[in-house]
Amino acid sequence: MIDQTTQPGHGNVFGNTRIALKNGLILTHPGASTVQKHKFTLFDNHLLSVVNSEPDQGAEYDMVVDCSGCLIMPGFVNCHNHTPMSLLRGLCDDLPLDQWLNNYIFPAEAKFVSPDFVYTGAMLSMAEMLLSGTTTVADGYFFMENVARAAIDIGMRTIAAQGVLDVVTPDASEGKHWEKRVNEFLENFPSTPITQPALFCHSPYLCSERTYVKTQRIASDNNMFLFSHVSETALEVQNCLSQNGLRPFEWLTRIGILSANFIAVHAVHVDDHERELIRRHNAGIVHCPRSNMKLSSGLGHIKKLHDMGIRVSLGTDGPSSNNNLDMLEEARVAALASKVVGVGSDAMGAQTSLFLATQGGAEVLGMEKVTGSLEVGKHADVIVIDLDSPHLNPVYDPDSTLVYSARGSDVRDVFVHGKQVVRDRKITTVDLDAIMKKANGLSCEISRNLGVGFWGEK
Ligand SMILES: [Zn+2]
């Protein structure tokens, strides 16, 4: 329960209050430290100014949150998403990736994706993520300045990466006009302390050498990350081998793309030589085990990459290839899946999985000094998990409880950049009912047009 709320601080995404947390337990460095009894933590505006110390006697705060019976920890970092695709969630599921994309998703996107679709879908996804404890997301799609606007309105730390493909897209009517779209995106991007732009080359099978090289140049010149799906399926590897005589990471290395600002999503089918190339060029990796399982893509040996010192993180992938955005569930499945591809020390335990979902993600996104752990001077991206539930008792090992037993719905309070965005399991910044109504209205239109069922509230 929040015992005192004098100035909730709403109306300002960037936090303008002194918020104190007291009591409960605290996990400051998931995967690297143990849980401690919590005394007192303070956010001064958007920064953590005290972490688990004694309070100043007589000091006054705008809000004091009692965390008795709860665990305080850093918010989750979801390194891969396509947030607007929440409006396509559950549409034509249970197909392999190539059929799902080419026969259903790409045609539906061509018809329906607009700036309004992108903003509404992003809002729906961000509400879901905040309510389940994710405070940072790296997103990739079309009309991405609208994802950044949604992030500012709801209050979520976001890297919004503009999609680049060599085919016609909803925001680039001629395939070769992606450069114009990227310029528009950069000109209109609302940069704030919680939003930053990036680029996203879809994949080696939808982007040419010229496109990768030009995109990487633009990304480097503007100090941005370049994301790309790489080695998601065995078919992609086979096609790359027959077209270029090289496996995908070898080809990307040859054309000069692999570097510290390059973040490869999936990396399911990777051999030892490719792992060494990723390590040597210091590229980041995003592991999306639930998406890989659902689309029959296979399972990457992520523990091997992590043990080599490669920066590895977790991502949910888009809501239509997962189909939820709960990072606790992603961490659980990552730990379980690693035991399918490895045994003993070759498999990932709860601690490592929790690290990838927080600090590991922050390191991949270049935010290791901003988020991912609770330290004085870092930005206040903090979540409070309610432990008062049958499935969370008893607690012998907090890491194990969090990864194998906790759910996103156990998250009670969420703070991003020092601002409370979830209070007592409710979004504080926007009208969630209005967002869901709008989302269902758009989805109803899509279902009518495609001739598929619709069972949501219109
Ligand atoms: Zn994806």
Image (cartoon, helix red, strand yellow):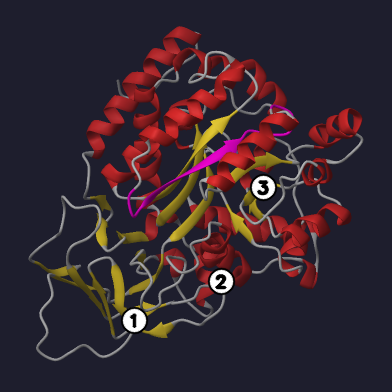
Q: To which residue does mark 2 refer?
A: 400
Of the residues tagged 2 and 1, which is closer to the observer?
1
Q: Quadrant of residue 164?
A: top right
Residue nearest the viewer, comparing 196 with 22: 196
Left or right for 343, reference 309: right
Q: To which residue does mark 3 refer?
A: 264
Q: To which residue does mark 1 refer?
A: 51
Of mark 3 and mark 1, the one earlier in the sequence is 1
Residue 450, position in %: x, y? Answer: 50, 10
Left or right for 261, reference 367: right
Q: CA distance from mark 2 to mark 3?
A: 28 Å
Asked if one can make out residue 96 in the rendered structure from this viewpoint, the answer is no
Q: In what element is the residue under mark 1?
A: loop
Q: Name the quarter where the C terminus is drawn.
A: top left
Asked if one can make out residue 363 in the rendered structure from this viewpoint, the answer is yes
Q: Residue flagged by tag 3: what amino acid is it?
A: Ala
- Residue behind label 3 places its C-beta within 8 angstroms of ligand 1: no
Of mark 2 and mark 1, the one earlier in the sequence is 1
Asked if the residue at tag 1 contacts the one at tag 3, i.e. Cβ–Cβ closer than 8 Å, the answer is: no
Residue 451, position in %: x, y? Answer: 49, 8
